[in-house]
Image (cartoon, helix red, strand yellow):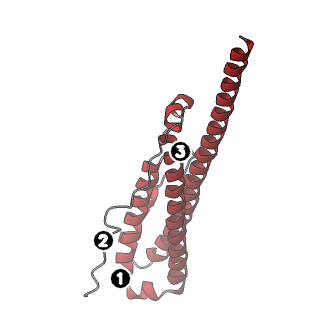
Amino acid sequence: MSFVILSVLGVLVLLGGYLIILQRGWVRLDELCSNALSQIGVQQSSRWDGLTALADVAKGYAEHESATLSEIIGKRVPFTPSMGASEVARQEQLLASGLGRLMAVAEAYPDLKADALYQKTMEGVTTSEDKVRMSRMVYNDTVTRMNRSVRMFPGSLFAPMMGFYTRPYLEEPAGKTDMPDLSR
């Protein structure tokens, strides 16, 4: 009788230990996902700052376009840890819209494109874009690890009970994957 009780207790202790290990792993992955998303927010903030600086440089060349750019910049939502992947994607679309508008202004005003301050600021925006791209890749890689851990057996049995679920991926914005027309 005591052997059976000890055996059951042993199994329960092993199961409890296993669940603790699983939970700690999910917490670690969840924190990594949150951190990676936060890094995207930091990089987006740099891009917004660059877009604002570019708009200021362009103001002297195209006052009427400056109002449109200011409107886009005004829609910016500062990053908060509670933001999800969908809000990060929405901010990406706003940034792309603003940068696209600014590029059209630069094309219309060759003097603006030749302006040293414009060129330097544009280089900073391009660097920030590269950092956002890398941060998005890190986030999606981390989400893959989290989702795999939560969805695979035996984690799939216990993860929902402990409050861990799959996270959404950051999708590539529509049109970004299309090849540009180089025939012009």
Q: Return the disc, 1 or 2, that comes first in the chain's sequence.
A: 1
Identify the image quadrant of the N terminus: top right
Q: Nearer the viewer, mark 2 or mark 3?
A: 3
Q: What residue type is labelled 3?
A: Ser
Q: Which of marks 1 and 2 is in front?
A: 2
**Element marked by disc 1:** helix
Residue 124 horizontal side relative to residue 102, left or right: right
| Residue 78 can be seen in this image | no
Identify the image quadrant of the C terminus: bottom left
Q: Could you tell me how far apart the alpha carbons at marks 2 and 3 are, in whole angstroms?
A: 33 Å
Residue wearing tag 1: 107
**Element marked by disc 2:** loop
Q: What residue type is labelled 1?
A: Glu
Foreground residue among 160 and 133: 160
- In the rendered image, which quarter is residue 15 located in? top right
Residue wearing tag 2: 178
Q: Position of residue 109 (x, y in %)?
A: 37, 84
Q: Where is residue 134 in the image (x, y as percent from the top left)?
A: 53, 66
Residue 170, placed above or below residue 101: above
Q: Return the disc, 2 or 3, that comes first in the chain's sequence.
A: 3
Q: Could you tell me how far apart the alpha carbons at marks 1 and 2 are, in whole angstroms?
A: 22 Å
Residue wearing tag 3: 149
Label 1 crowding class (10 Å Cα cut-off): few <14, some 14-19, many 20+? few
Residue at left 38%, top 76%? 103
Q: What residue type is labelled 2?
A: Asp
Residue 177 horizontal side relative to residue 112, left or right: left
Q: Residue furthest left?
A: 183
Q: Where is residue 121 in the image (x, y as percent from the top left)?
A: 54, 77
**Element marked by disc 3:** helix
Q: Where is residue 144 in the image (x, y as percent from the top left)?
A: 49, 52
